[in-house]
Image (cartoon, rainbow, N blue to C red):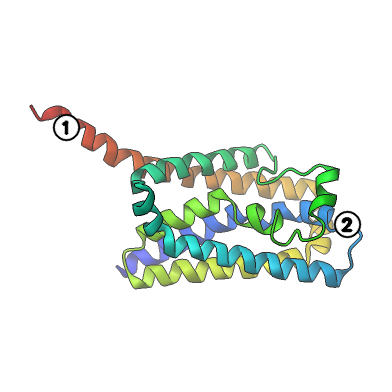
Amino acid sequence: MDSMLLPFALLCFTSFFTLTNPLGTMPVFLTMTHGMTDKERQSIVRRATIVSFITLMVFVFAGQFLFKFFGISTNGFRIAGGVIIFKIGFDMLQARYTPMKLKDEEIKTYADDISITPLGIPMLCGPGAIANAIVLMQDAHSYEMKGILIGTIALIYLLTFFILRASTKLVKVLGETGNNVMMRLMGLILMVIAVECFVSGLKPILVDIVKEGMIP
């Protein structure tokens, strides 16, 4: 079991960091908070990361209940989650920011409390992150793996908090080219994870179909 912990931890970290995408969120965050003071920005970042973390934790622990309540199979959710994550990764590979596109008039509408929406949800905690959290919780077969999953999510949002706090400086350092390169790289990683998720959900369904076809 110990040999599974490190690969699982790496999977959790890379998938959630890519789905949360704090580096890709920086330019949008700076646009939405244009004209605000550093203190106001820090307050928004703090609330957004807390809201995102709590929301994701709700789905981590309530995922099984939701499956049973709505009659959803784990394999079906893996397939749907894989498609969603693949779409996000593909758009990132094209250096397009997908979680939320805002027009100028929409930015003004959200300016009162962007920490909850759209920054917290769905930017930092979108459908891809939620699907990933539920699927990985299903794959966490021990308390150690569950602890790694929860700890990794907490670490990701802590990193997101510090990255967005320093967004003004980081955007200048990375530049547009550097930001696009990072986004493309994370998109490629995300697409690979999505394919694995899709196949892991499709394989048991195909096996069941074959078995049913072989039974007279």
> Residue 160: x and y, percent?
66, 64
Amino acid on which the number 1 mark rests in the picture: Glu
Residue under the point 78% across and 70% down: 42
Residue under the point 73% across and 43% down: 101
Amino acid on which the number 2 mark rests in the picture: His
Above/below status of 187 relative to 153: above
Mark 2 Cα shell of 10 Å, populated few (<14), some (14-19), many (≥20): few
Q: Secondary structure at mark 2?
A: loop
Identify which residue, 157 or 92, lies in the foreground: 157
Residue under the point 72% across and 45% down: 180
Residue under the point 64% across and 69% down: 50
Identify which residue, 147 or 8, lies in the foreground: 147
Q: Is residue 23 left or right of residue 42?
A: left
Per the image, the residue denoted by label 2 is 34
Mark 1 Cα shell of 10 Å, populated few (<14), some (14-19), many (≥20): few
Q: Secondary structure at mark 1?
A: helix
Residue 212: give its label.
1
Identify which residue, 130 or 151, lies in the foreground: 130
> Residue 45: x and y, percent?
73, 66
Which image quadrant is residue 53 in?
A: bottom right
Which sits earlier in the primary sequence, circle 1 or circle 2?
A: 2
Q: Is residue 7 left or right of residue 208?
A: right
Q: In whole angstroms, how far apart are the C-alphas of marks 1 and 2?
A: 60 Å
> Residue 139: x and y, percent?
36, 58
Q: Is residue 75 left or right of residue 22?
A: left
- For the N terminus, the quadrant is bottom left
Which image quadrant is residue 102 in?
A: top right
